[in-house]
Image (cartoon, helix red, strand yellow):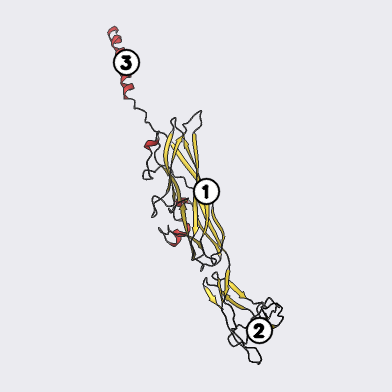
Amino acid sequence: MTLFHRWSRPILGLLVCAAIFAWPAREASAATSCTATMSPLNFGSVDLVAGGTFETSATLDYTCTNNDNDVAYTRVCFNLGNGSASQAAQPGGAFDPRLLSFGSNLMQVRFYQAGTALIWGSTSQVVSNAYDVRVGPIPRRSGGSNGVVTGQYTLRGVISSGQASLPAGTYTSSFTGNHTNVRSTPAATNAGNVPDDCAAATQGSDDFGFNVTATVMNSCQVTANTLNFGAVDGIASATAINAQSTINITCSSQTPYKVMLLPLNNNSSTGAGLMKGDTSGNTDTVPYQLYRNSGRTQVWGNVVDTNNTTGTGNGAAQQM
């Protein structure tokens, strides 16, 4: 018994030492997670007949949290899909431009990364340039609280010109669910180990869903050529002197319109005007009558549904 007891202690010591040397070394990395929210992208009311482009912006706010005892660095990638309207109209496509819908009507819109000409896309989709940013240093966990870094970025939305044929209405698309997500690369404890792109960004599944809205107004634009009777050698006879001009009206598609004419120098509701001389002190006037047809049988005045001209817009110029 004495002999057995003497050798048991060194054997135990050897076992303890073996356990110590077999313990794995601590990996030099930090654990982070990132979340984000996006404000609505609302164009408000747009007049497509007026032409030009329309711009607005939305704000991305993100937060990255470090729950490790080392400072952390990571590359965060914000992926933006094609949206519900694009997906319904062109499954798997319509990234540039994306689409907003009002019934079966589709409006084209582009989403840019702020201050650039880059379309904001997704690493897993047709347009691959997601917005990415290196975040760090994120403070280490301390006193029971995680370290936090926040940031902000702008999404720029542009409605393209040349869409006057779209009818008035509210056009929308939803970017929720798998149409947005946040991915980040494995966290590192120094900036030099952070990847330069999103290829390794696989961590996280948070989304930053938002809605896009644009309301197309009922609108019209009117242009007219000068009605010129030319040179007239007196008006001694009763023979009428005829002249004609054109009025062009462009209204948004499906917009009903009425065109009424009211001579300002006598406010005649029946289109009977007076021309005045342009010489100082000349009080003479020359009467004229406006008509809606070449046969001069339908006067063109200012009485609704009586002597006005009506039509429905199609987004293109219509000649009266």
Give SS at disc 3.
Answer: helix
In whole angstroms, how far apart are the C-alphas of marks 3 and 2? 122 Å
Which one is in front in this view, the residue at disc 3 or the one at disc 1?
A: 1
Q: How many C-alpha atoms fall within 10 Å of the one at disc 1: few (<14), some, or many (≥20)?
A: some
Which one is in front in this view, the residue at disc 1 or the one at disc 2?
A: 2
In front of the other: 137 or 124: 137
- Which residue does the image show at 59% across and 81% down from the upper left? 228
Q: How many C-alpha atoms fall within 10 Å of the one at disc 3: few (<14), some, or many (≥20)?
A: few
Give amino acid for label 2.
Tyr
Location of mark 1 (residue):
59
- Residue 63, percent from left and from top: 49, 41
Location of mark 2 (residue):
288
- Residue 9, percent from left and from top: 31, 12
Give SS at disc 2.
Answer: strand
Q: Are marks 3 and 1 in contact (CB under 8 Å)?
A: no
Q: Is 107 located above or below residue 186 in the figure?
A: below
User: Quick one: label 3 or label 1, which is nearer the N terminus?
Assistant: 3
- Left or right position of 134 against 289: left
User: Quick one: label 3 or label 2, which is nearer the N terminus?
Assistant: 3
- Residue 221, percent from left and from top: 57, 70
Residue 187's disc number = none
Q: Is 205 located above or below residue 7 in the figure?
A: below
Rendered-image quadrant of the N terminus? top left
- Which residue does the image show at 69% across and 77% down from the upper left? 280
- Residue 35, percent from left and from top: 48, 43
User: Quick one: label 1 or label 2, which is nearer the N terminus?
Assistant: 1
Q: Are marks 3 and 2 in contact (CB under 8 Å)?
A: no
Give amino acid for label 3.
Gly
Give amino acid for label 1.
Thr
Location of mark 3 (residue):
13
